[in-house]
Image: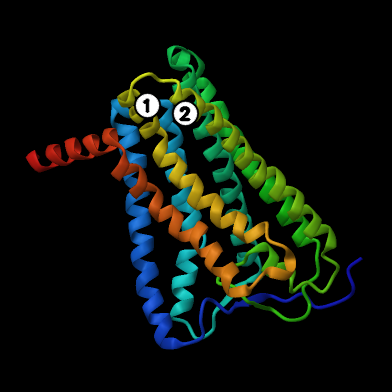
């Protein structure tokens, strides 16, 4: 039960460092990172729409991932950049919980989307003759919708249970954005239920899809090894390589963040892990898919030549 108190109206974000000289350097670094992330992900969304050769399930899910990453990084970086240059690094109560909701929603959706992309590669390699029949557009839309709905429900649960808490005392968040564990530390009421919900949601939203991805790639690798020619094996594996790299980067940071014992958590390490999967990975995703994907590179070059002619 909430005790009588005056609810705070804003939070103070401590950010990554208190040193002004380092904050300027970080502002430049993350501004460049943010611009690269936006340009790369916008590029994938646009070319996936305008190029008919990319109207396939693989690029449908990839464009969903890029669209998600645009907003995922945008939910954090602009405010972080402003705070690098501000003396008072504050965020309103409503703004904090809006940021918390959006970040959780998009993070959960990305977990499910990476699973959907793994399933797409499974069908392409393990049932190539039935690929177009199984992965028809209506199924892809249903899968993508389910991913977004799953992320939304996960975020809604966390946000509603966080909003039921009272925040009457300290308002300083030792983080660069409103992440759930950091916000819960400031609550003046019992958060044991919230921590239990976090544990079960991590199992369902993070570890569940991750283990399903591992199982899926177990079947994929088994089928690749059955291919008689080395050229065929190499070609089959190359279609999965980019996705494997992205899964490793994203889930590696999240598992490091959420699956360690409570007494081993170090604030600065948690910040770095969160920074990696929330800011760095969305920037790397389009680079990984563009640099390793022949179709994407050819479409980009084709569009560049057309623009040069015009």
Q: Nearer the viewer, residue 144 or 272?
A: 272
Measured from the top left, where is residue 171 in percent x and y? 69, 79
* Residue depicted at x 86% and y 67%: 190
Residue that carries the numbered disc 1 in the rendered image:
233
Secondary structure beneath dot 1 equals helix
Q: Nearer the viewer, residue 257 or 56?
A: 257
Measured from the top left, where is residue 278 in percent x and y? 51, 58
Is residue 197 shown above or below 62?
below
Is residue 292 shown above or below 180?
above
* Residue depicted at x 39% and y 55%: 283
Residue 58 falls left or right of residue 207: left
Residue 162 falls left or right of residue 119: right
Rendered-image quadrant of the N terminus: bottom right
Please name which of the two marks, 2 or 1, marks the residue nearer to the observer.
1
Q: Quadrant of residue 145?
A: top right
Is residue 95 shown above or below 244?
below
* Measured Cα–Cα span from mark 2 to mark 1: 14 Å
If you read the primary sequence from the N terminus, does the residue marked by circle 2 or circle 1 appear first? 2
Q: Nearer the viewer, residue 96 or 266?
A: 266
Q: Which mark is residue 121?
A: 2
Disc 1 crowd, CA 10 A, few/some/many (<14, 14-19, 20+): some
Residue 103 falls left or right of residue 301: right
User: How many numbered circles are shown?
Assistant: 2
Measured from the top left, where is residue 149 in percent x and y? 63, 38
């Amino acid at each position: 039960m909430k005790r009588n108190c005056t609810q705070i109206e804003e939070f103070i974000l401590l950010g990554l460092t208190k040193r002004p000289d380092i904050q300027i350097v970080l502002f430049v670094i993350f501004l460049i990172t943010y611009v690269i992330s936006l340009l790369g992900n916008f590029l994938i969304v646009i070319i996936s729409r305008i190029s008919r050769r990319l109207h396939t399930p693989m690029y449908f899910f990839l464009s969903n991932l890029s669209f998600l990453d645009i907003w995922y990084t945008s939910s954090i970086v602009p405010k972080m950049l402003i705070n690098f240059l501000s003396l008072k690094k504050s965020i309103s109560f409503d703004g904090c919980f809006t940021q918390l909701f959006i970040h959780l929603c998009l993070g959960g959706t990305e977990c499910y989307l990476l699973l959907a992309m793994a399933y797409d590669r499974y069908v392409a390699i393990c049932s190539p003759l039935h690929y177009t029949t199984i992965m028809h557009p209506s199924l892809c839309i249903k899968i993508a919708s389910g991913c977004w709905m799953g992320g939304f429900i996960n975020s809604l649960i966390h946000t509603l249970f966080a909003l039921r808490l009272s925040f009457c005392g300290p308002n300083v968040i030792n983080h660069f954005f409103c992440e759930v564990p950091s916000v819960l530390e400031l609550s003046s009421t019992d958060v044991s239920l919230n921590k239990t919900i976090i544990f079960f949601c991590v199992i369902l939203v993070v570890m569940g899809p991750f283990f399903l991805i591992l199982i899926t790639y177990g079947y994929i690798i088994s089928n690749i090894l059955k291919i008689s020619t080395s050229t065929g094996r190499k070609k089959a594996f190359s279609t999965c390589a980019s996705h494997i790299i992205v899964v490793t980067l994203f889930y590696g940071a999240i598992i490091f963040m959420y699956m360690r014992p409570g007494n081993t958590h170090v604030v600065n390490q948690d910040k770095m892990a969160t920074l990696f999967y929330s800011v760095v990975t969305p920037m790397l995703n389009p680079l990984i898919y563009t640099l390793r994907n022949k179709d994407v590179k050819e479409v980009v070059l084709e569009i560049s030549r057309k623009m040069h002619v015009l």
